[in-house]
Image: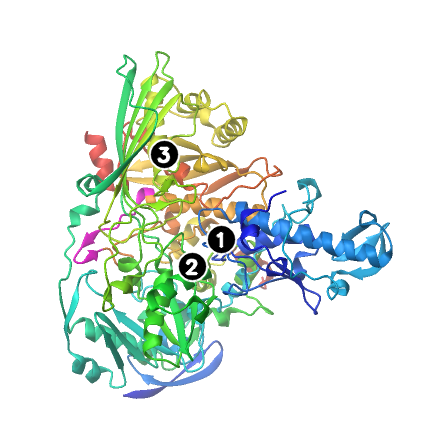
């Protein structure tokens, strides 16, 4: 039976009428028209669909809507916009940290969650945080450089 | 001057270039962007020849009718082959407009220069630019090839790391075909036949409808599709159907056929070339056999396609490697005239060759023709992409060499077994499910326009050295046990893995350092330069003794024997498993259009090759491929990727070579040779799993 499920999406209240077993990824891409979270495997094995739920990076292909009531969801669209990019988005463009780009939404989300808990991650920590995210084009080193750059800029900007 | 082949095939200048009222220059080319950055590179060449700033170009989105027909975007050939066409077209346009401006101004064309799209005389503005003259210069004419192209030292934009225009949308959430939502669009899933000969015996439609009451079930022969307004409903209907369907004639594929050695047991045709068999000699002979398994393209997004059939016209949306080949495929399978089919390209996940991208548009077309009106979107599942997309063929390489008294390599024989590397081109997996399908029978090898036969297996089969006598024997298996088709480099990278592993073994047999041995057989200065540069980058002279658990190895080749020169080194540590510590690459790919883009491609190629070498193997079972999840088919992860250093040489050479598949073979060889150095023992079969490392140590 469809339920009305209310949650916070990218900083704004959202409400959808869906089955409580409906998957967050399907609802984001379908009902809500937010295509940033990508379908990669549907089994939590690739990371392409990652979003933040209450600040934690999770694979939205495995999250049922029933578990979301009252929570906060941030997708890559909620990180920033072309006019006001998140420092991560700006750094990924600046360092051209992408080829096909299909994995980038999930990687940006996981990187945002990492920097939130560890503002000065080293190479091994970034790699560890992104190990659940597959990339086939081989932009791993650029991604690590871009996350490092964004984290540095965010530290420099943050009040001491 | 003769026209570049792609311009000769599409000679009308207005197919390539135009000037739009908003002050932009319109550039069209027939190559598909799929993240490799070709859009930026080709536009840079156009901007230079036109003398128009890059930012004022508008790249025409790829669609049949809107862009020149350049076939498929394959083989690391876009820069090398499409580049000259777009340069020649732009140069000719520039000359035509310069002549028109000169007529208006009453001066000679040679008195004029073009800057930022405007004509200058003695450095002063004339008030004329391309746009002011657009109405009087008719570009609906054929190229003559008479215009003079710029020389490299006259190029400003070529050689700059212009950012890729396609990348920003990919970090803000909307970019891909997968994201297109057309009004009234419906979603479909297709039930796949368990093997091309399987027939549908029964489907419990009631069970499907109980779960998804609104589902539209389409059955035509063994082609079964479930169509719903919501994608999740189509997926659910499909899942219920999978558990409630019976087939007859399902195939059972022997898992043992997934091994490279099993290729020898399959029917094949044999093609021999090169020198006659070696006379018995008293020279020293060395032989070794290498194996490479079937490999998945492993695109991050399962393929998707959209089709709409309305008023007898079929419109397809695809992220494949070419809109015109897609149209030809759709025409053949649907029976529609090509003129009745429009194909629109949209961005997709990286394909690295012929992955599943051709298939969902055909699935969708078959449904749309039977359900005219709404757009039909077919999204393959991860399992579909792994199981039904073509894979790169396994290869078995038996190499044999004769060394003279000094240890020099003087006679080389490569005998290889593989399926045709381009075998599944122009096919779709859905075809065999349709009523009336007839198996096309053996067509193992593509006949090239010059009459030669091409399977893709012989690329780089002879190592890139000065060798007096060489010969090849190729056994091409048909039918292949699973669909096989183009995977980045075809046989090139696997052959370089084998050949360059073998050259290390020959160096050992000759008692020589692997780098010195190679340099003694490379007379080409550009080849020597990449090897010498690599030696400095990786500090080769400090290489330690074999068998220490730490290894340094290298590989060298010239792409396809005629393209860029490249050398790669790898440092590894082995403690049961191989850990990549660092990698280095020196490449001379001639004129570099976009240095950052070239580095991105070269590094990506190295990482993909490292993944192939250490991790990947398609497995068989049931009706076909058994490795259908990322758990079954692991690829290299972030924590396993080493830092990589790349140096580009000779970047202002007169001609560019492709970089998309330049680095894979040498990266595979470098890792293989580093592993052998670390172990003091050779592993000859890919991938280098923990079990194979242990076996090599025990042997």
Q: Quadrant of the N terminus of chain B?
A: top right
Marks 3 and 1: which is nearer the front? 3
In the foreground, B107 or B403: B107
Q: Is residue B624 magenta?
A: yes
Q: Secondary structure at mark 2?
A: helix
Q: Locate residue B105 relative to residue B225 in the image: left or right.
A: right
Please tell me which of labels 1 and 2 falls first in the chain.
1
- Secondary structure at numbered mark 1: loop
Q: Residue at x 19, y 43 (%)?
A: B266
Q: Position of residue B350 (x, y in %)?
A: 42, 56
Label 3 chain ID: B
From this view, report whether residue B348 is shown above or below residue A69.
above
Does B237 sit above or below residue A129?
below
Q: Secondary structure at mark 3?
A: loop
Q: Earlier in the sequence, mark 3 or mark 1?
A: 1
Look at mark 3 in the image and give the residue it sits on.
Answer: B461
Q: Quadrant of the C terminus of chain B?
A: top left
Report, in whole angstroms, how far the alpha carbon at label 2 lies from the one at label 3. Answer: 29 Å
Residue at which label 1 appears:
B36
Q: Is residue B51 visible?
A: no
């Amino acid at each position: 039976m469809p339920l009305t499920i209310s949650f916070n999406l990218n900083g704004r209240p959202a409400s959808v009428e869906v089955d409580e077993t409906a998957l967050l990824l399907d609802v984001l891409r379908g009902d809500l028209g937010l295509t940033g979270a990508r379908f990669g495997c549907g089994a939590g094995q690739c990371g392409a669909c990652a979003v933040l739920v209450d600040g934690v990076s999770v694979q939205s292909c495995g999250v049922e809507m029933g578990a979301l009531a009252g929570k906060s969801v941030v997708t890559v669209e909620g990180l920033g916009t072309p006019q006001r990019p998140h420092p991560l988005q700006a750094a990924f463009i600046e360092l051209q940290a992408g080829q096909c780009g299909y994995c980038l939404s999930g990687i940006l989300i996981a990187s945002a969650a990492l920097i939130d808990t560890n503002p000065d991650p080293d190479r091994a920590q970034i790699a560890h945080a992104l190990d659940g995210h597959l990339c086939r084009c081989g932009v791993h080193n650029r991604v690590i450089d871009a996350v490092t750059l964004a984290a540095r800029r965010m530290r420099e900007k943050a009040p001491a | 001057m003769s026209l570049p082949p792609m311009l000769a095939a599409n000679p009308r200048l207005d197919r390539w270039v135009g000037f739009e009222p908003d002050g932009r220059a319109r550039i069209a080319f027939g190559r598909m962007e799929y993240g490799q950055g070709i859009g930026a590179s080709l536009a840079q060449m156009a901007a230079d020849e036109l003398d128009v700033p890059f930012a004022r170009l508008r790249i025409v989105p790829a669609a049949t009718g809107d862009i020149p027909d350049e076939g498929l975007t394959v083989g690391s050939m876009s820069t090398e082959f499409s580049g000259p066409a777009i340069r020649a077209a732009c140069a000719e346009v520039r000359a035509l407009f310069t002549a028109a401006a000169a007529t208006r101004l009453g001066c000679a064309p040679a008195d004029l220069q073009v800057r930022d799209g405007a004509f200058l005389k003695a450095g002063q503005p004339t008030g004329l630019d391309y746009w002011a003259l657009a109405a009087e210069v008719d570009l609906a004419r054929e190229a003559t090839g008479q215009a003079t192209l710029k020389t490299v030292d006259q190029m400003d934009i070529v050689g700059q790391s212009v950012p890729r225009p396609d990348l920003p949308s990919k970090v803000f959430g909307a970019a891909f075909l997968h994201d297109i939502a057309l009004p009234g669009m419906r979603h479909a899933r297709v039930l796949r036949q368990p093997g091309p000969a399987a027939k549908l015996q029964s489907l419990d439609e009631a069970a499907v409808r109980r779960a998804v009451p609104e589902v539209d079930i389409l059955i035509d022969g063994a082609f079964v599709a479930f169509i719903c307004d919501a994608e999740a409903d189509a997926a659910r209907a499909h899942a219920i159907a999978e558990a409630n369907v019976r087939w007859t004639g399902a195939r059972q594929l022997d898992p043992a056929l997934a091994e490279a050695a099993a290729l020898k047991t399959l029917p094949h045709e044999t093609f021999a070339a090169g020198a006659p068999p070696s006379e018995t000699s008293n020279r020293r002979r060395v032989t070794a056999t290498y194996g490479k398994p079937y490999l998945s393209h492993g695109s991050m997004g399962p393929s998707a396609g959209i089709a709409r059939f309305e008023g007898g016209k079929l419109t397809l949306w695809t992220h494949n490697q070419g809109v015109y080949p897609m149209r030809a495929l759709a025409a053949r399978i649907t029976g529609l005239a090509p003129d009745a089919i429009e194909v629109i390209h949209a961005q997709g996940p990286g394909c690295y060759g012929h992955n599943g991208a051709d298939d969902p548009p055909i699935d969708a077309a078959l449904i749309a023709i039977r359900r005219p009106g709404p757009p039909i979107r077919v999204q393959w599942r991860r399992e579909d992409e792994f199981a039904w997309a073509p894979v790169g063929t396994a290869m078995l390489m038996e190499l044999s060499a004769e060394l003279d008294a000094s240890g020099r390599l003087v006679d080389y024989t490569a005998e290889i077994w593989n399926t045709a590397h381009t075998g599944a081109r122009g096919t779709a997996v859905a075809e065999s499910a349709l009523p009336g399908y007839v198996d096309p029978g053996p067509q193992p090898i593509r006949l090239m326009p010059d009459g030669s036969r091409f399977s893709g297996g012989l690329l780089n089969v002879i190592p890139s050295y000065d060798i007096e006598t060489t010969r090849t024997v190729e056994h091409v298996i048909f039918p292949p046990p699973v669909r096989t088709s183009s995977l980045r480099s075809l046989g090139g990278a696997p052959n370089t893995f084998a050949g360059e592993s073998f050259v290390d073994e020959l160096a050992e047999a000759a008692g020589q350092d692997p780098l010195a041995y190679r340099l003694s057989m490379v007379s080409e200065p550009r080849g020597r330069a990449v090897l010498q540069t690599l030696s400095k980058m990786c500090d080769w002279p400090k290489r330690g003794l074999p068998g220490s658990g730490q290894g340094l190895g290298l590989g060298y080749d010239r792409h396809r024997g005629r393209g860029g020169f490249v050398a790669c080194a790898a440092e590894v540590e082995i403690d049961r498993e191989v850990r990549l510590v660092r990698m280095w690459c020196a490449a001379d790919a001639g004129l570099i259009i976009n240095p950052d883009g070239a580095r991105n491609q070269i590094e990506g190629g190295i990482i993909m090759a490292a993944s192939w070498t250490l991790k990947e193997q398609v497995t068989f079972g049931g009706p076909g491929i058994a490795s259908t999840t990322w758990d079954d088919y692991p690829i290299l992860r972030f924590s396993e990727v080493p830092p990589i250093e790349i140096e580009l040489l000779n970047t202002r050479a007169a001609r560019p070579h492709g970089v998309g598949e330049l680095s894979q073979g040498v990266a595979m060889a470098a890792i293989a040779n580093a592993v052998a150095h670390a172990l003091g023992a050779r592993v000859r079969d890919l991938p280098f799993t923990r079990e194979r490392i242990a076996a090599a140590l025990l042997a």
